[in-house]
Amino acid sequence: MPEGEVRALYRRMGCLLLLVCLALPCAGAAEPVGEQLDRVFEEYSTLGASVAVFQNGRVTYTYAYGRIRPDGPEVTVDTAFQAGSISKMVACIGLLQLMDDKGISLDDELGDVLGYEVRNPYYPEVPVTLRQLMTHTASLRDASDYDDALEGEGLPLETLLVERARAVFSRSEPGHERVYSNFGGGLIGPLIEALSGMALDDYMARNVFEPLGVTAAYQASRLVGKVPLADMYLMPEGRLAKRPGDDASALRDYCFTAGKLTISAQDLCKILIALCDGGICGNARILKESQVAEMTARQDHIGSVFCDSGNGLFLNIITDDEVEGRTLYGHGGKAYGMLCAAYFDPTDRTGVVMLTNGCNNKSDANGVGALGRDILTLCYERVIDPFHQVEDPFEVR
């Protein structure tokens, strides 16, 4: 046998031997991933949760824990949760699509899209731009008027932005300071509807969700009978906080994209895959590669002004060493007792989604919190580690 063929044979035999060794059980083997996840969720008094992991363009691990309500059915990998502020990042995809179709720039004025002038009354000569809106630097704040709207008693958007402008704008000059604004995130919905001429959920279904094979909605009532829905509870007392979709008919159009997206962890993974892979998941493209690059770029210059926003377009960037020393892109979410996280690392095309419907944990500035960091770290150490052998890649606990 020629020397080259002999070397190739030895290499193949060596690889086969390595695979056999990895598959064999050994003394002191690590605790199964599912059991470790169980312990973490129990530590934070979690009612129900779902975790999904993706690698190289496909979901490779899913896990479900707990119940959709204290006396209700168990969570499955198909259970849909309200995702909190992750809603902003997902809705931003639809808005960027439409801006590209209509030739609208990130530095165009917000009012030009809405059809009426929008200015901070404390700085009436300073434009309020779409880029400022998407980086939380538009000087919008979550005033009592927005809180009223979440309870079904909100004023029309134009009334808020024009007649009640002093209530919803801060005294910071637009473009100079990052102040997180749920009200600002809620404006994505009216912008999508103004540009598309369609209802928010109709547009997102046709242009984002359906191409990816995702079942999701900003009005959870649209999902009733299609997928199991998790109610939200305040933990550890176990008090009902909100049922998805209960109040949808009473809410104003600017209440949905801030935090009302309802989706399963494995479906949210598909959206992260598209953001991780330049706008593509499977055979579907939902954004141009250049749009993804803009969305994930650190937006430090807002127009001609330097403003250390530290984040992308409705997208957070974690750069500390708490999650395997990685730089992660995505968003967290919290509302009505639940905590969620959805982050990816484009350098090795990996990502993790965690959704809960109630836990005893507060979030940090990125909406992740200790629970989110524990789950992200565990998944990156045990599931995404290329030398880890998953016993069963689909676990339900």
Image (cartoon, rainbow, N blue to C red):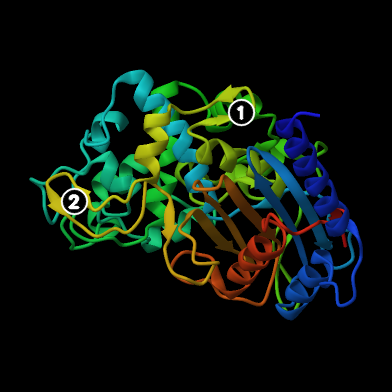
* In the depicted structure, whether residue 249 falls above or below residue 321: above
User: How far across and how far down the image is residue 106, in percent?
Assistant: 27, 35
CA–CA distance between discs 1 and 2? 33 Å
38 vs 159: above or below: below
Q: Residue at 73%, 74% (x, y): give it.
A: 40
Q: Position of residue 141 (x, y in %)?
A: 32, 59
| Point 64% across, 44% down: residue | 268
How many residues crowd mark 2 within 10 Å: few (<14), some (14–19), many (20+)? many
Q: With respect to residue 378, does 246 lie above or below? A: above
- Residue 10 in sight: yes
Pointers 1 and 2 in contact (C-beta within 8 Å): no
The one of 162 and 2 positioned closer to us in this rendering: 2
Q: Secondary structure at mark 1?
A: helix
Q: Earlier in the sequence, mark 1 or mark 2?
A: 2
Q: Amino acid at mark 1?
A: Ala
Figure quadrant of the C terminus: bottom right
Residue 78 in the image: above or below residue 390: above
Q: Amino acid at mark 2?
A: Asn
Q: Residue at x 22, y 36 (%)?
A: 107
Q: Quadrant of residue 320?
A: bottom left
Which mark identifies residue 294? none
| Residue 205: mark | 1
> Please, what secondary structure does the residue beneath circle 2 have?
loop
Locate the N terminus by quadrant: top right
Tag shown at residue 120: 2
Say which residue appears at 84% left-offset and 46% top-offset.
Answer: 16
Front-lying residue, 173 or 365: 365
Hey, which quadrant is residue 37 in on the image?
bottom right
Residue 2 locus on image (x, y percent): 75, 29
Q: Residue 101: image x %, image y %?
A: 37, 19
- Marks counted in the figure total 2
Whether residue 78 is visible: no
